[in-house]
Every structure is written in structure tokens, then in C-alpha cells.
Amino acid sequence: MTQPNFLIIGAARSGTTALVRYLEQHPEIYITEPKEPHFWAFAGKTVNFQGPGDDEEINKEVVSDPEKYQGLYAGMNGARAFGDGSVSTMYYADEAIPTIKQYAPDAKLIALLRNPIDRAWSSFLYTHARVHEPVKDFDKALDLEEKRIADNWHHMWHYTRVGFYAEQLQKFYDAFGRDRVHVFLADDLRADSIALLKDVCRVLEVNPEFEFQEPGDVNRSGVPKSRALAKAINVVRGNSMLRSIAVNLTPRSFRDKIRYSNLHRPKLQPEQRERLREVYREDITKLGEMLGRDLSDWLK
């Protein structure tokens, strides 16, 4: 099996799609299509999540067979750095680590982390954008999280649980050592994308002077203005034939414009932010100590 030499392991709703859109421009880097085959978390397993939309989306998207996963690298054409961007990898650390040790034992692991409070809110808006979240109130959705996890809804519904980065990263540090796990912050990608991309290129041992182009607005979330349009977009995305037609006939920028123009992005309320601040205070403090970074702004 082709052994990928890097993996973007997480975190969901933290800017990994933007990072991939940048990196796939580089002639020495190859990233699988789809970018998230979720192989590391679910290798050899039959995935049967039970949340709204899970059967049409993640249950179909997971590539759990090693031979099929191998086939995703057929077009890499001698790339020096090759891997995928499955953000489930970091969250399902207990399942993913043994699989990485088996199939990609030397891979460099890259994590891109976002303030977990904003990440949780973004995840809630993402499920609304897909017209799957049945609850309009964020607090109620948070109250339902443990039941949804028990009922086998997939990780996008685990609004708070996904954001405990310190405990997840510690497992990767213990398994692979700190020199193999490279952590970047979404704040830095927004503030100085060029500097961060140079650092990532150095990690991947490819030319850091490559001139990346801005990928534009990527993977925006929000509440649909028209649920009918959002459902129609989901039908196209969920049908391989229709999706192929759309991809071949229209540029990605046009498809994104249609989708994003239908989204309204409400703000997280102060009392909701305070609720999540208390949920994450200890983990954020621990993460800051692990990374040697001042993350106090995440708690403001």
C-alpha cells in the first residue's frame, strides 16, 4: 500500500479545507479526492451513523477498505508530499492511531486548531447549512449532544466534544512523539497565511517559496435563507452523477457563490459564549501549556 507521508488530522471546522485549497496548488503536494476519506478513523469498518443526513453523507463518503484507499493515490504523479485531510483522525484518536501505525508509520501529522468556542458554533451553523439540524436553538442542541452521541450521530454533531484538543493531541504525542505532530492555529492562517504556509511546506519538505493564491471564501457555514435551495444543493452534492455534471459544467467559485449567497450567519450570543468558555477553560489552559502559546484570547 502507498504509505502517505503526511496527514492533516484535524480539527473539523477549523480551516482545514482552506489549508487544503492552498496546499493542493503546490506542484509537489498531492491531496486525495475526496480530501476526507476518513480511512484512519474507520479502516475495515462498516459505517452506519444515525443522525439526520448521515446516511446520505458520511456513511457514503467513508473509504474504509485499504485497497480503495490506496486507489486515491493513483494520480499523484511523483508528488514529494502526499496525504489526506480527514479531520475525523484527531477526534477518533483511539481508532486512528493504530491504523496510522499500520499503514502510514512515518507520516507527519498536521493539526490546524481553531478557538473551540467558535468551532462549536461553526459546526452548529454547518449542520444548519446542510438543512440537517432539527433544533434552532444552540443551547438546546448543546443539551442534546450527549444523547445524540449515544444515538450514534456522527462527529459533526458533537459540537463541544470535538473541541477538547489537548486530550486528543496528547494521545498523538504519546504515540508518535512531538517531532511528528505539527500544530498550527487558524488564527495564524488568517493573520499571515504566507508565513504559516511556508512553515507547513518546510514540514512537508517541499519548496516553501511557492507563491500560493488566495482560495477565496471556503466552506462557509450559516443558516439557509431558502431551505428549498439548500435542500436542492444537498441533492446535487449527494448524487454522484449530478455532482459530476455540476463539477464539469461550472467552476468551483460559481458553485460556492450560489451556496454562500443563500446563507445568513447569525452571531453567537454572549451568554452562549460564556457557557462554552466554562466548558473549555481547563482544556484551553492545558493546550496553551502543551504548545507554549498564549491562548488567553480564546477565553475572552
Image (cartoon, grey):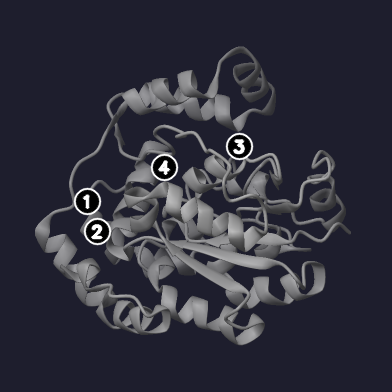
Mark 3: amino acid: Gln
Identify which residue is drawn at 69% across, 22% down.
241
Q: In the image, is residue 221 above or below residue 295?
A: above
Q: Where is residue 88 drawn, in percent x and y?
A: 57, 61
Q: Where is residue 10 drawn, in percent x and y?
A: 52, 61
Residue identifier under label 4:
132
Mark 1: amino acid: Asp
Of mark 4 and mark 2, the one earlier in the sequence is 4
Would you call the spot at circle 4 few (<14 residues within 10 Å), some (14-19), or many (20 or more)? some
Q: Which residue is at the far front?
A: 209
Identify which residue is drawn at 63% across, 46% down.
35
Check disc 1 and report its element: helix, strand or loop.
loop
Q: Which label lies toward us, 3 or 1?
A: 3
Q: Mark 1 and mark 4 in contact (Cβ < 8 Å)?
A: no
Mark 4: amino acid: His
Mark 2: amino acid: Lys
The CA distance from mark 3 to mark 1 is 39 Å
Q: Mark 1 and mark 2 in contact (Cβ < 8 Å)?
A: yes
Identify which residue is drawn at 49% across, 33% down.
213
Of mark 4 and mark 1, the one earlier in the sequence is 4
Residue identifier under label 1:
137
Q: Which mark is residue 25?
A: 3
The CA distance from mark 2 to mark 3 is 41 Å
Residue identifier under label 2:
140
The CA distance from mark 4 to mark 3 is 32 Å
Quadrant in the picture for the N terminus: bottom right
Front in this rendered view, residue 221 or 61: 221
Check disc 4 and report its element: helix, strand or loop.
loop
